[in-house]
Amino acid sequence: LSLLLSACTQPTPAATAEPTTAATEAPVEPTEAVVEPTEAPAGPVVLSEPWPKELKQAIAAVGPAVVRVDVTAMVDTPSSILSDPFFRQFNVPEEQETEGVGSGFVIAYGADKYVLTNAHVVEDATDIRLVDTAGQEWEAEVVGADDVVDAAVLRILGDASSLHAATLGDSDATEVGDWAIAFGNPLGLSYTVTLGIVSALGRDLAKPSGAGTFYNMIQTDAAINPGNSGGPLLNLAGE
């Protein structure tokens, strides 16, 4: 600014016309601007809703349909242990009982209710128990499983009338950038909700076992950890 001012105030060459006498004016004293302080608004400042209200509505609608899947299974003892002379002296059994935790959600099929989960959650299961958000328990059995899409259907043994059923959505209508709500039991922390967006569509990923591929998957940046397997991924409509 000072450079511009000095450039604007440089003397100009004298004019060739006859000099005239200009009237002089008294210099104007500079004045300082006074900013009046403003009063703080009375009461708390109310901010606009930072997230769509549909988020809480979707969580409230589907939450009662989410169940924890407690599984007892028999797994083969690793051959490296069975062949080790040190472990053989302890008569290590060829199969061992193991326990795991996954997630699932209730759907309605006609007048009956079933639970959808991942096939790997209930693989080799000898006992399956479902626990809802209220702490009620049911035994369950596998009706069918598909390793290609890693999906399994569980039949609920006992009166399931108190269980809420979720609404299935249309994955073909999903778009990149849509909100994505993940519901499940990560790391054994029951009924945890995480939030993100749909990051990509049509992902093909090798299975963790190295045998086969998962095709046409939805990628999300919502936090997902062991125990989330089988839980629903929701849109804003709660589907």
Image: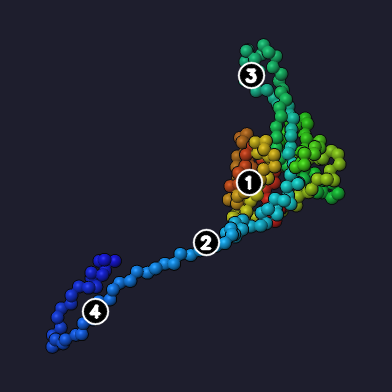
Please provide percent x and percent y for residue 168. Answer: 74, 51
Query: Mark 4 or mark 2, which has the lower sequence index?
Result: 4
The span from disc 2 to disc 1 (Cα, nearest Å) is 37 Å
Q: Is residue 111 left or right of residue 63?
A: right
Q: Is residue 18 left or right of residue 221?
A: left
Q: Which residue is mark 4?
A: 26
Q: Which residue is mark 1?
A: 194
Image: 143 above or below 41: above
* Foreground label between 3 and 2: 2
Q: Which residue is mark 3?
A: 81
Query: Mark 3 or mark 1, which has the lower sequence index?
Result: 3
| Label 4 close to label 2 by CB (< 8 Å) | no
* Foreground label between 2 and 1: 2
Amino acid type at image mark 4:
Ala
The span from disc 4 to disc 2 (Cα, nearest Å) is 43 Å
Q: Is residue 29 left or right of residue 117?
A: left
* Foreground label between 3 and 4: 4
Quadrant containing the N terminus is bottom left
Residue drawn at x 71%, y 20% is 94
Image: 199 above or below 79: below
Instruction: Describe the element under mark 2 as helix, strand or loop.
Output: loop
User: Residue 205 is drawn in which quadrant?
Assistant: top right
Instruction: Describe the element under mark 4 as helix, strand or loop.
Output: loop
The span from disc 3 to disc 1 (Cα, nearest Å) is 39 Å
Residue drawn at x 14%, y 80% is 14
Query: Mark 3 or mark 2, which has the lower sequence index?
Result: 2
Amino acid type at image mark 3:
Ile
* Foreground label between 1 and 4: 4
Q: Which residue is mark 2?
A: 40
Query: Mark 3 or mark 4, which has the lower sequence index?
Result: 4
The span from disc 1 to disc 4 (Cα, nearest Å) is 73 Å
